[in-house]
Image: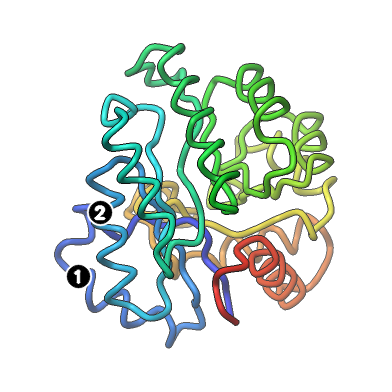
Amino acid sequence: MIFETHAHYDDAKFDTDREMLLAELPQRGISPVINVGSSIATTKTTLSLAQEYPFLYAAVGVHPSDVDDLNEDTYAWLRQQTTLQKTVAVGEIGLDYYWDKEGHDLQKHWFIRQLDLAREMNKPVMIHSREAAADTMEIMKEHGKGLKGVIHCYSYSLEMAREYVKMGYFIGVGGVVTFKNAKKLVKTVETIPLSSIVLETDCPYMAPEPHRGTRNDSRNIPYVIAKIAEIKGVSVEEVEQTTRENAFALFTKVPR
């Protein structure tokens, strides 16, 4: 069975066939699945999905591009959601200087506050970082020390990946690893231990080859598994089983 650690099935791109697709996942050997909030609105829809599907769990949090959602009232609401039985993580949170939709100081403020929330509520974190490598690492070293979590959709250097692994974080690997231009990620996957990798799609985004550019979903994870197995020279069964165990070790509130 495949443990899918990062999906967005509440996205409008799944409106036409969500029920049919989600019903199919356990039959295809994909369970459990963590659906991830990225705003106050998508945290609400994520929680609704988690209530509806027994194999689906929720991460609650606000993405750096949506931190204008956050104030003391909405932060208090978010905190309350971390107490729910099916909430297993705080995320996705972090910094995004690519879209640069929100000011860097505001992003940093709410990133730190949400790291503090995860520490207070004893939850792992899902870290989004795009074109913000140095600032993310600085904040993680100061405010993320001792937390557990995953660096989602990892895109930085091997050296930085080693640093995160040393801090106890997992590296999230998805469809990008199959792209021809993913040399840095391939090198990272080749070098870090398999015991530090978890599988994710970030669906509906980041579909792997041979489906790059189409709507992604968890049924494409076998392409990611096959690529990781090829890079590391191990069997697909070993990749599937080890990453599953890694995910259960990280998301301890998800029952086996």
Q: Quadrant of the C terminus?
A: bottom right
Q: Residues within 10 Å of mark 1 (few under 14, many from 20)?
A: few
Q: Horizontal and vertical percent for residue 88?
A: 50, 61
Q: Would residue 13 be found to the left or right of residue 230 on screen?
A: left
Q: Secondary structure at mark 1?
A: loop
Q: Would residue 216 be found to the left or right of residue 191 on screen?
A: left
Q: Horizontal and vertical percent for residue 80?
A: 36, 52
Q: Identify the residue position indicated by label 1 in the image.
A: 17
The Cα atoms of the two marked residues, 1 and 2, are separated by 20 Å
Label disc, if present, on residue 41 of the rendered structure: none
Residue found farthest to the bottom? 27
Viewer-nearest residue: 135 or 153: 135
Q: Please, what is the three-letter code of the amino acid marked with disc 2?
A: Lys
Q: Identify the residue position indicated by label 2 in the image.
A: 44
Q: Earlier in the sequence, mark 1 or mark 2?
A: 1
| Disc 1 versus disc 2: nearer the observer | 2
| Label 1 close to label 2 by CB (< 8 Å) | no
Q: Secondary structure at mark 2?
A: helix
Q: Please, what is the three-letter code of the amino acid marked with disc 1?
A: Asp
Residue at x 76% of width, y 54% of height: 196
Residue found farthest to the left? 16
Q: Is residue 158 above or below residue 53?
A: above
Residue at x 53% of width, y 57% of height: 200
Viewer-nearest residue: 73 or 10: 73
Q: Is residue 164 above or below residue 15?
A: above
Q: Horizontal and vertical percent for residue 104?
A: 45, 13
Viewer-nearest residue: 168 or 171: 168
Q: Would residue 194 be found to the left or right of residue 51 on screen?
A: right
Q: Horizontal and vertical percent for residue 77?
A: 30, 45
